[in-house]
Image (cartoon, rainbow, N blue to C red):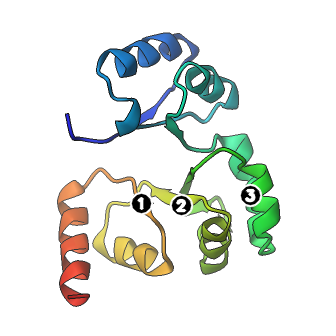
Amino acid sequence: PWLRFNIDVKSDDAVDPTVEAILSAGALDRVLVTSFSERRRTAATRQLPGVATSASAPLVARSFAAAAIGSSRGTRLALRGVPAAQVPERYGRVRIVTARTVRTFTAAGVEVHVWTVNDADTMVRLLGLGVHGLVTDRADIAIDVIASRRRKHI
């Protein structure tokens, strides 16, 4: 009952069952609901008042343009009501996660979560930039990296 989950709604048919599962588990305060599709994301979050959510792909694209030039105001407007943006470090040749974009998103009140990060060196580098979360297939490595960072700050 204390675990937190990131739930990515990947199809239209999954919206209602996802909402039902979250409500029946009493997990509204323990999940972050996301989707690449803005339509699916809003369909789910409309039924889950107060649930945390992450920006869909279209919102990330709009906010990235503002963040790339350091506009906290533009980023805040693009991500109004969205407390997190879950992004890849790069999209093709374009680097999404930079010191500037992390600072700008943070100044706009939006957490930056990077996916999918599976090696320690990259985790350390991204955490050093100030990202707030890492999506990983290697929780064992992430636990070691975070524990090591905590020991260094004690």
Q: Which residue is mark 1?
A: 133
What amino acid type should be assigned to the residue bearing mark 2? Val
Q: Earlier in the sequence, mark 2 or mark 1?
A: 2
Q: Secondary structure at mark 3?
A: helix
Q: Secondary structure at mark 1?
A: strand
Residue 66 image position (x, y, % from top left): 80, 64
Q: Residues within 10 Å of mark 2 (few under 14, many from 20)?
A: many
Q: Earlier in the sequence, mark 1 or mark 3?
A: 3
State whether residue 27 is above or below residue 87.
Answer: above
Residue at 62%, 61% in the rendered image: 109
Residue at 75%, 68% in the rendered image: 72
State whether residue 21 is above or below residue 131.
Answer: above
Q: Is residue 96 visible?
A: no
Question: How far is disc 2 from disc 1 in space, using C-alphas?
Answer: 6 Å
Question: How far is disc 2 from disc 3 in space, using C-alphas?
Answer: 13 Å
Identify the mark at residue 112; answer none if there is no mark. Answer: 2
Image quadrant containing the C terminus = bottom left
Q: Is residue 72 visible?
A: yes
Residue at 67%, 65% in the rendered image: 93
State whether residue 125 is above or below residue 132.
Answer: below
